[in-house]
Image (spheres, rainbow, N blue to C red):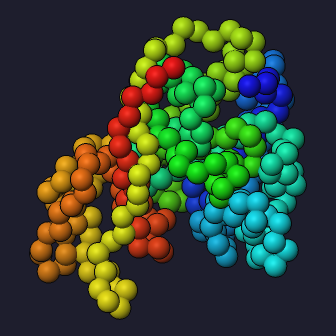
Amino acid sequence: MEKINRVAVVGGTHGNEFSGIYLLRKWQENPELVERASFATETVFANPQAFEANKRYLDCDLNRQFTEAQLTDVELANYEQSRAKAINHQLGPKGDAKTDFIIDLHNTTSNMGPSLILLKSDDFNKKLGAYVLAKMPDAVVVYEDQVSMAEHYFLASIAEQGVIVEIGPQPQSVIRQDILDWMEDMTGHILDFVDAFNADNLPELPAEYQAYTYVETLTLPMDEKGERIGMVHKNVQDQDFKPLNPGDPIFTLFSGEEICWQGDYEAYPHFINEAAYYDNNLAMSLGKKITVTL
């Protein structure tokens, strides 16, 4: 892969995820904290009106508006759809972006700790995952490479390379020091990696590491009217990245009945009971544990 010349650090894609927003303010006042010798760094506040309204979004989820088809459809013109086109103009255009690498900063209400979500599984991303884990042993790496960057609808997919920093648990519209510190540390390590990559000066990395790959998303139990009739089981709540085996209880109905996991693989739930996903009745994502080899 060619040298990375332009990096964008994006915060506030969701207006009530505060860590990235307040870090952006800090970095805008102290730009040397995110500057590195081998590339230019730009900071972007993605969704300021949602932040002012103290909401995740005003009209629709900004982080679901970045397929090429959406970006070129002039009829998609509500606030977040318009912001997506403006950000694409600023950092892109997608498919031929002026920005080489995007770091998009997010909080989750789920107990995921410091998580790095990689959208590609090429050599660059495999090494990035290894580097971050070497610097942050408590971190988790998740691959969401099930579709190409062109097909991804995330903001980070504007560039040829893009990652999502996902840190929790943090309630919506709240700042927690431990979560903010994790986000700042992980962002710094990613920037250091890119700088070392550009200089062909990466440290020795482990030959392999454990990560997770996205498989599917589960919905909350609902009746035929689409009303919720249950909740995430107490044994699963807050157990992000802990194994779930076939037959383990996963939901409890309000009647008291338990629903068990009927999958045919050992699953690793994450984004468990994410508050932002209740508008779509999503309960959690499931992944498989994988060994990544450099």
**Can you tell which quarter of the image residue 76 is in?**
bottom right
Q: Is residue 17 visible?
A: yes
When the figure is inspected, residue 231 is found, relative to residue 97, above or below; the finding is: below
When the figure is inspected, residue 179 is found, relative to residue 204, above or below; the finding is: below
Q: Is residue 18 visible?
A: no
- Residue at coordinates 82% horizontally, 33% vertically from top-left? 6
Q: Is residue 110 left or right of residue 53?
A: left
The x, y position of residue 221, in whole percent, is: 29, 75
Number of callouts: 0
When the figure is inspected, residue 255 is found, relative to residue 154, above or below; the finding is: below
* Residue found at the very far bottom of the displayed protein: 225
Q: Is residue 59 left or right of residue 231?
A: right
The x, y position of residue 32, in whole percent, is: 78, 25
- Residue at coordinates 71% horizontally, 60% vertically from top-left? 67
The x, y position of residue 288, in whole percent, is: 35, 43
**Can you tell which quarter of the image residue 112 is in?**
top left
When the figure is inspected, residue 212 is found, relative to residue 219, above or below; the finding is: above
Rendered-image quadrant of the N terminus: top right
The x, y position of residue 116, in whole percent, is: 52, 38
Name the foreground residue: 127 vs 1: 1
- Residue at coordinates 74% horizontally, 36% vertically from top-left? 101
Name the foreground residue: 54 vs 250: 250
- Residue at coordinates 25% horizontally, 57% vertically from top-left? 263
